[in-house]
Amino acid sequence: MIDNWKRILNLCLVLSSLLIITSFLFISFSRINYGFDLEWVEGSLLDHVWRLYDRLPLYIEPSADFITTNYAPLYYYACIILWKISEPDYWQGRLISIISTLIIAFFIFRIVVRERKDWITGLACAGLFISTYARTGYWFDLIRNDMLTIAFFIISIYLALDKQSIRNIILSGIFSALAILTKQNFIISAFFMALGIIYMQNLKQALIYVSSLLLFLIPVLLFFHFTSNGWSTYHMFILPAYTPLAYNPISFIKLLFFNDIGIYSIPIIAIIILIIYLFSMKIISLSKEIVFLIILLAGSFIQSINNRIHFGSFINQYIIVYVLLSLLIGLFAVKLNSTNMKIRLLFSVLILFQSICFYAIWDFYVPSAKEKQKVLEFRKKLDTLSKFGNIYMPYHGFLSRKHSKNTTIHLMTALSHFNTTDKCKTRKQAYISFIDSIQKRKYEVIIWDKFRNVNIRKIPYEEYLLYTNNYKPVAFFKDPPLLMNKLTLMDVHPFQILIRRDIPDEKIKEVMNLAK
């Protein structure tokens, strides 16, 4: 009878995991060709890729042409490889994130199978990670550097867990360096990785890991530093230090428990409580591998919280935490095979419930046929408006570049400077650069966005509008395309068309009739 229940549970776990992974692929490839920003910084990252495409430097002093964001460069180089193969568009950057997500899921599966010889639990934990797609801001398939970073880092973890191979420890350091070169705050996780290696293996192995990491990382950072006159170091490491806190301790605790965690994380929290209970009752024990992952989880949680409490941050910061939780749950779950059947049943039900949460609003992520049609119509209007000359869309630089061939300042990138303390040397400089880009009248058309956000400290909209006196509003978009990130407290979409005043009214009327 017990064996029959085990078979039923295992079948449910396998089917649920396969269904989640398949559904994620369906959702992702339904969004991959969506011809508009799915999230408010997608266009900013593509602006940087276009800099590489035009053989221009990434890290420069803020100017009226371009302001660099505070990210490491490797994701941009990954995108440019695909841009060299086919026409630049959104799908290449999203494809990198989708592939990275699948790599993460595969290595969660592979680590559990290698450490515990249980492919069913490994598959269930891979599905468990994918099921946090909504809980982490629908980030797994966006044009962002998070998933590529974590893909490098999970490979580093996989290699570090091989205690018999010096070569793999060296490779682990190199992959950690690649993660840092994709998103620099993973330096914190790499530090805790070294501590975990000391516990799991010995100090010598940890020194080999750190040495290989630094020998790979430092020459690359120095190359960017000297070829950019120090601006790469400034943007990656100094500028983020000037970003102030967005929350005091009390307000952040409220945010963490009443917003960040949410219903999608309740099953995972219950699993953690169950594991703590079982450990306290000595029903399960801690192996060195599990302690290694707990140390790494602690470091990643510190890293995530450190990022989350600053202005402009979002719940995508917790992705690495869910990755490590999925791994830990997998290693504990196998140990429950030989324990009380009721505990095994409860454990499996919690994992299955987490999977069910994935389907609660799964169709919410998929662009409808109407939304896709609105995007096509909008981009046709951009082609018509480009007859005036250069188009500036403050939040959609990729589309500006795509349809009117000019480089622009992405406003979200500028905000990474505006949202700093007064001591930041580029805060005023970036502001002046942004205003200069309007004052110099380098654009014939400005498409102003309707904007709502509660998590940005300073936005120079009044000043922006003051300097649009060289332009006149000529039309509103009645049915504009919307961003797909409906739960990020952002509402950004094309709203108003402004035309430079020195363009003859006859030409404005002629083109506007075509653009209706």
Image (tube, grey):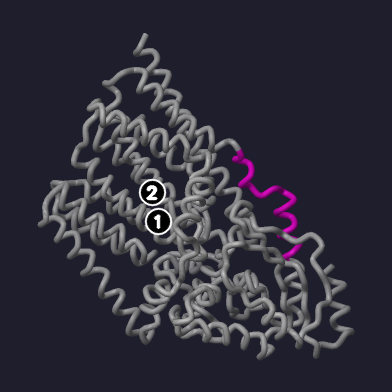
Judge from the rendering whether residue 65 lies leftward or rightward of residue 61; answer left or right. right
Where is the C terminus found, in terms of image quarters? bottom right
The quarter of the displayed image where residue 457 is located: bottom right
As measured in the structure, the alpha-carbon distance from the residue carrying label 1 to the one carrying label 2 is 8 Å
Q: Earlier in the sequence, mark 1 or mark 2?
A: 1
Q: Nearer the viewer, residue 75 or 330?
A: 330
In the image, is residue 129 above or below residue 235? above
Check disc 2 and report its element: helix, strand or loop. Answer: helix
Do the residues bearing badges 1 and 2 touch, measured as CB atoms within 8 Å?
Answer: yes
Check disc 1 and report its element: helix, strand or loop. Answer: helix
Q: Amino acid at mark 1?
A: Ser
Q: Amino acid at mark 2?
A: Val
> Can residue 259 be seen from the camera position used here?
yes
- Dot label at residue 321: 2
Q: Residue furthest top?
A: 1
- All told, the count of numbered labels is 2
Q: Residue at x 70, y 48 (%)?
A: 368
Task: Please say whether residue 365 is one of the residues in the magenta stretch.
Answer: yes
Q: Residue at x 72, y 59 (%)?
A: 481
- Percent coordinates x, y for residue 291 in the rendering: 23, 43
Q: Residue at x 28, y 45 (%)?
A: 294
> Which class describes the residues within 10 Å of circle 1: few (<14), some (14-19), or many (20+)?
many
- According to the image, label 1 marks what residue? 304
